[in-house]
Amino acid sequence: MEIISYVQGEPARFSFPLLIRKRRKQKDIWTFDTEWKTASATRVKNPFSFKKVFVAVGQEVTLLEHFIKKNIKPLLITAISIAIFCTASFFALRFFMYLESHTGPLELAKQTVDFDNLDTLMSAFAMETAPEYDKNGNIYDAVELSSDCYTKPVTYQVYKVKSGDTIIGIARKFGLSNISTLISVNDIGNVRQLAAGQKLRIPSVDGIIYTVKKGDSINSVVDKYGIKLSQLLDVNDLSSDVLSVGQQLFLPGAVMDSQSLKNAMGDMFKLPIAVSFRWTSPYGYRTNPVTGKKNSFHTGTDMACPTGTPILASMSGTVSYTGSSNVWGNYVIINHNNGYQTLYAHMSKIIAKKGQWVSQGTRIGLVGNTGMSTGPHLHFTVYKNGKLIDPMTVLK
């Protein structure tokens, strides 16, 4: 008997007993003789080498090549079948997603519905609020300062913001008539980020801060902002009309441009859908997709996307209403405390709760197909001071 073994460690020999049985028949009885034999084993050396690896790999490749050549036809058929299946599945999925997000015709059950009034029902949801300032930032009912105030150097005092304060309320408290003043002097990027405990510099007169740029002259500055040279010199206590780059001037009576003011007041909305979608129906007159009637007024803009797509608050504010109606299905209305209200309609699910404060981008619901809808989409409406406006004029 031959025994081959691999012994770990140093080469060694060892012995162990083997039980050898011999059988011998004596008449009808079998007997066994037992004796002990000794066998030895030594380590078999089989060192690793790259040559052996390459040889083994080459042999396997050769076998694979022979297998492919022998079965080339069924392999090609299988590969083509898999490719066709994957391609068909991909386009089927894309087509299904398109159908899910397509606002196609809607077959309505026979019922009496006043379709001409559907788009006017939104007005019942909007809250009328009186505007507090005009597009130039002038606060209504504020006492305008006399031009005599611009003959003395501007002075500042510090105010600590309290809970419930607004930029307009603070301006009124200190006798300022334009909200640009506090925004510019304190370099406020967004008034909605004002927090209790924050300290503001309050100037003694209305105006904005201007940083001198290369090429500016004192005459070009006063011409650009329509202020008097004498007032500019007096308010800034200047003894010379020579300006230096980086110098900061207080421009008495000047206001921020309307676009900068809108940004600072948080009047710019973000898209309420953050993923891919299709614009399917703009604001304004259109052919009604349900009735086919022409010159039907659409109160908002529609964004078609699959059911379940998250709907985000377009701007921070307080959730004023959540509910359901036959027209708008599940809907949410947010009051933005600056004369704006937004409506988000046809939701499959409402996430926000009435009275909840939501910041811009907060998830408030999911896209759906509830109410008078021709397919899963978000209907987005914007009101400004109780009046409809085109959402595209405030979206960015």
Image (cartoon, rainbow, N blue to C red):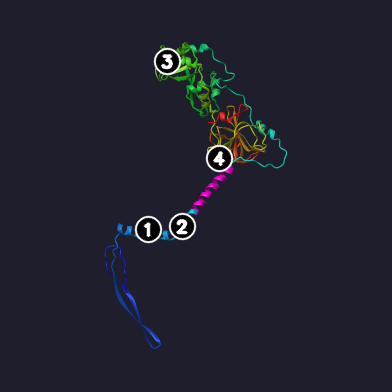
Q: Which of the two discs, 1 and 2, labels the residue nearer the N terminus?
A: 1
Nearer the viewer's eye, disc 1 or disc 2? 2
Nearer-N-terminus badge (4/2): 2
- The residue beneath circle 1 is 61
Mark 2 lies on a secondary structure that is helix
Q: Amino acid at mark 2?
A: Leu
Q: Is residue 42 left or right of residue 314?
A: left
Q: Give the crowd class for mark 1: few <14, some 14-19, many >=20 residues within 10 Å.
A: few
Q: Are marks 3 and 1 in contact (CB under 8 Å)?
A: no
> Which residue is at the far bottom?
27
Q: Amino acid at mark 4?
A: Pro
Report, in whole angstroms, how far the alpha carbon at label 4 lies from the one at label 2. Answer: 45 Å
Left or right? Give the position of 39 relative to 132.
Answer: left
Q: Earlier in the sequence, mark 4 or mark 1?
A: 1
The amino acid beneath tag 1 is Val
Is 158 rendered above or below residue 104?
A: above
Q: Disc 3 on helix, strand or loop? A: loop
Q: Is residue 377 visible?
A: yes
Instruction: State the mark number for residue 217.
Output: 3
Q: CA distance from mark 1 to mark 2?
A: 17 Å
Q: Residue at 40% of width from left, 60% of height from top?
A: 66
> Of the residues under marks 3 and 1, which one precedes in the sequence?
1
User: Quadrant of residue 293 in the image?
Assistant: top right
Q: Would residue 307 be visible to someone looking at this image? A: no
Q: Residues within 10 Å of mark 2 (few under 14, many from 20)?
A: few
User: Looking at the picture, does residue 53 appear above or below residue 129?
Assistant: below
Query: Magenta segment range?
Result: 81-100
In whole angstroms, how far apart are the C-alphas of marks 3 and 1? 82 Å
User: Which residue is at 52% across, 12% downward?
Assistant: 147
Badge number at residue 310: 4
Mark 4 near mark 1, Cβ–Cβ under 8 Å? no
